C-alpha cells in the first residue's frame, strides 16, 4: 500500500468531498479514523484526541471537519498538522463550504494564504473538487461533463453535453451522479435524444426541453406528460407558456414556408432571430463563430456605444441622458426570445415538415398547401393565446385550458 500523504486538504463541492473521504477510508483502512469538528470541539480536545492511541491500531488519521472562518482555528490547524508522522496523518475537509471558489477569481486571499502555509508540509495534498459552475460558465461545465463521460468510455459532443448540463444544473456533484447513473445503460455514443429521454430533470430548463419534446408526439403522450408535470407541481403558467412559445415559432416557420423559403433556409433564419444585433446574426456573409465574437463584444458598454453610433447611426447625443436621481421602478427591457440551441430549431422544423406538412399533403393540393398550413398555424397561435390568457387570469379551469392547448397543437390537420 502506498504511503498516505499528510496533511490532505479537501475543498469544493461538499458531496464530492464526502465521496473523496469515503474512498480514502477504503484505501487506507489500516488506519484508525478519528473524526473531529473544528467548530463544535475545542482546540485542546482535538489536540488530545490526536495523541490518543486506539487498541488494535498502530496508525491513525485525524479527519478535521467543519472548518470555521476564524484566524485562531486556522493557525491551530497549521500548527497541529506539523506533528504528522508515519503513524499519525491529518485530513482537513471543508465540509461546511467556508472556502468559496470563484470560477474566475479563484480562492480569496485569506484562505489562499492559509493553504500556502499548509503547503509548507512536504507531503501536503490539495483535493479541489471545485464549486458549482456559474450561469455564464458554459464552456467549463460542458468540458467537465464530457470528461466524466470519457472516463467511462462514452462519447458525447458539445451540443449533447450542454443539453445535459441544462437539464441537470450547474452543481458538480449532481452532474457526476447523473453521469454515473446514465452510463449504466448508455450506448457508446451519447445522443441528445438519449439525454432527453433518460436524464433526470433538476434544473429550470429541464421542463422546457422535456415537455416541449413530449408535446410534439401524439396526443396521448402529450397529455400523459402534461399530467405528470402538473402532478410534480409545475405551475400551469409555465406549461402554457412553453406551448405558446412553440406556437409562436411554428407560426413564424409556416409564414416563411408560405413565402417560398425552403426548410434548410428556414432553420438558419430562425436561429438568427431575436439575437442582438440583428444585422450581425442575420448577415449570411458571416460565419457562426464570427457572429458570436461580434455579438459578445457588445457586452462591453463602450463597445456597445461605439456600435450603436458608428454602425447603427444613432446620434451620440441621444445616448448622453442624465441619470435620474431616483432609480426607476420600471422593469428592464428584455431581449427578444431566441432558440437556445440548433437542435431545437431542427425539432421545430421536423414538427412542421414531417408532422404537419406530410399529414396534409395527401388531401390538399400543392397550390394551396402553403396557404392552408399558414392558416392552421394562425388558428393554433390564436387558440393558444386565448387559453394562455384564461390560465393567467383564472385558477378554476387551468387544467381544461391546458388540455385544449395540447389538443389543438397535436392535431396536425388543417
Image: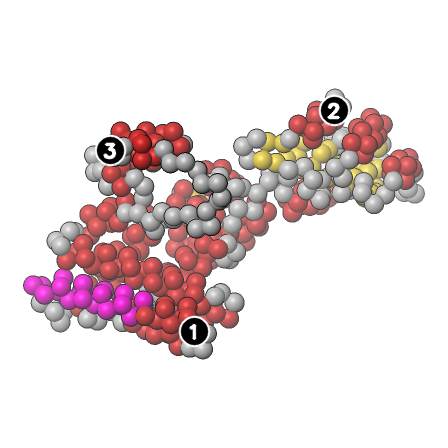
Which numbered disc, 1 or 3, marks the residue that appears first in the sequence?
Answer: 3
Tell whether 270 sits left or right of 402: left
Give the farthest residue toward the left.
367
Magenta-colored segment: predominant secondary structure: helix
Boundaries of the magenta span: 366-385
Tell whether 116 sits left or right of 243: right
Residue 318 percent across, percent down from the top left:
31, 35
Q: Name the residue under label 3.
A: 313
| Figure quadrant of the C terminus | bottom left
Label 1 neighbourhood size at 10 Å, few (<14), some (14-19), many (20+)?
few
Task: Please name the colour scheme applied to the rendered image.
Answer: secondary structure
Label 3 neighbourhood size at 10 Å, few (<14), some (14-19), many (20+)?
few
Say which mark, if any, is on residue 163. Answer: none
Name which quarter of the figure residue 56 lies in. Answer: top right
Say which mark, if any, is on residue 117. Answer: 2
Closer to the eye: label 2 or 3: 3
Look at the image and tell me whether residue 159 can be seen: yes
Q: What's the distance in space between the residues labelled 1 and 2, CA to CA?
A: 62 Å
Q: Name the residue under label 1.
A: 394
Residue 90 percent across, percent down from the top left:
79, 34
Residue 135 percent across, percent down from the top left:
49, 43
Residue 172 percent across, percent down from the top left:
57, 44
Amino acid at each position: 500500500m502506498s504511503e498516505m500523504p499528510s496533511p490532505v486538504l479537501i475543498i469544493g463541492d461538499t458531496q464530492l468531498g464526502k465521496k473523496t473521504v469515503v474512498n480514502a477510508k477504503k484505501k487506507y483502512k489500516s488506519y484508525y479514523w478519528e473524526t473531529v469538528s473544528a467548530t463544535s470541539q475545542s482546540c485542546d480536545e482535538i489536540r488530545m484526541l490526536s495523541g490518543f492511541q486506539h487498541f488494535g491500531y498502530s496508525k491513525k488519521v485525524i479527519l478535521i471537519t467543519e472548518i470555521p472562518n476564524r484566524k485562531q482555528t486556522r493557525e491551530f490547524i497549521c500548527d497541529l498538522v506539523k506533528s504528522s508522522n508515519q503513524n499519525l496523518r491529518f485530513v482537513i475537509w471543508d465540509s461546511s463550504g467556508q472556502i468559496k471558489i470563484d470560477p474566475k477569481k479563484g480562492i480569496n486571499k485569506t484562505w489562499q494564504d492559509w493553504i500556502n502555509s499548509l503547503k509548507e508540509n512536504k507531503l501536503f495534498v490539495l483535493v479541489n473538487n471545485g464549486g458549482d459552475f456559474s450561469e455564464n460558465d458554459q464552456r467549463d461545465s460542458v468540458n467537465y461533463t464530457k470528461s466524466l463521460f470519457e472516463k467511462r468510455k462514452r462519447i458525447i459532443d458539445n451540443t449533447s453535453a450542454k443539453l445535459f448540463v441544462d437539464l441537470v444544473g450547474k452543481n458538480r456533484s449532481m452532474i457526476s451522479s447523473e453521469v454515473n447513473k446514465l452510463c449504466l445503460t448508455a450506448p457508446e455514443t451519447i445522443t441528445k435524444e438519449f439525454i432527453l429521454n433518460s436524464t433526470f430533470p433538476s434544473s429550470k430548463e429541464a421542463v422546457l426541453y422535456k415537455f416541449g419534446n413530449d408535446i410534439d408526439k401524439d396526443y396521448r403522450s402529450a397529455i400523459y406528460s402534461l399530467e405528470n408535470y402538473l402532478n410534480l407541481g409545475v405551475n400551469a403558467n409555465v406549461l402554457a407558456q412553453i406551448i405558446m412559445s412553440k406556437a409562436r415559432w411554428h407560426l413564424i416557420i409556416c409564414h416563411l414556408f408560405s413565402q417560398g423559403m425552403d426548410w434548410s433556409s428556414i432553420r438558419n433564419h430562425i436561429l438568427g432571430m431575436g439575437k442582438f444585433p440583428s444585422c450581425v446574426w442575420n448577415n449570411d456573409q458571416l460565419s457562426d463563430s464570427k457572429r458570436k465574437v461580434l455579438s459578445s463584444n457588445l457586452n462591453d458598454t463602450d463597445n456597445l456605444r461605439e456600435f450603436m453610433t458608428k454602425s447603427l447611426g444613432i446620434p451620440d447625443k441621444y445616448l448622453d441622458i442624465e441619470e435620474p436621481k431616483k432609480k426607476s421602478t420600471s422593469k428592464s427591457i428584455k431581449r427578444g426570445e431566441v432558440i437556445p440551441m440548433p437542435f431545437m430549431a431542427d425539432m421545430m422544423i421536423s414538427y412542421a415538415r414531417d408532422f404537419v406538412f406530410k399529414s396534409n399533403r395527401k388531401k390538399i393540393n400543392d397550390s394551396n398547401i402553403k396557404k392552408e398550413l399558414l392558416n392552421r398555424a394562425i388558428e393554433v397561435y390564436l387558440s393558444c393565446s386565448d387559453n394562455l390568457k384564461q390560465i393567467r387570469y383564472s385558477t378554476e379551469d387551468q387544467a381544461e385550458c391546458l388540455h385544449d392547448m395540447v389538443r389543438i397543437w397535436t392535431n396536425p390537420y388543417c
